[in-house]
Image: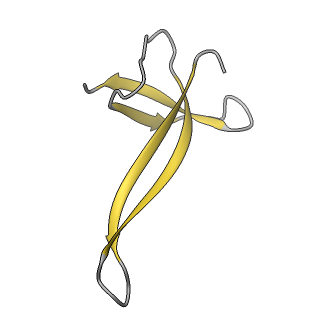
């Protein structure tokens, strides 16, 4: 997985009946290009044409 980052997108939504906030997450594989990323960085990703079986996103910028 050289040149690939696994990006986790977390969102909070209320339970339909009990209204408690539930944390839902989804993981995307994204191409890093020439960016040097480390674990825990916040990044912005954009959808692109499929690059492989699982990879169809690209890291566009590092936020922090």
- Residue at (42%, 24%) from the top-left corner? 39
Residue at the extreme left: 64
Spot occupied by residue 53 in the image (x, y as percentages of width and height): 74, 37
- Residue at (50%, 19%) from the top-left corner? 32
Can you say which quadrant of the picture contains the C terminus?
top left
Spot occupied by residue 58 in the image (x, y as percentages of width and height): 50, 28
In the displayed structure, 28 sits above or below 12; it is: above
Q: Is residue 19 left or right of residue 31?
A: left
In the displayed structure, 22 sits above or below 57; it is: below
Q: Nearer the viewer, residue 36 or 48?
A: 36
Spot occupied by residue 13 in the image (x, y as percentages of width and height): 33, 69
- Residue at (54%, 41%) from the top-left corner? 28
The way the protein has been coloured in the rendering is secondary structure
Spot occupied by residue 1 in the image (x, y as percentages of width and height): 66, 21
Q: Quadrant of residue 55?
A: top right
Q: Nearer the viewer, residue 51 or 23?
A: 23
């Amino acid at each position: 997985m050289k040149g690939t980052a696994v990006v986790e997108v977390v969102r909070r939504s209320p339970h339909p009946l009990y209204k408690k906030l539930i944390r839902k997450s989804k993981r995307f594989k994204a191409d890093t290009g020439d960016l040097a990323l480390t674990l825990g960085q916040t990044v912005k990703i954009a959808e692109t044409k499929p690059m492989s079986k699982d990879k169809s996103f690209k890291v566009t910028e590092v936020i922090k």
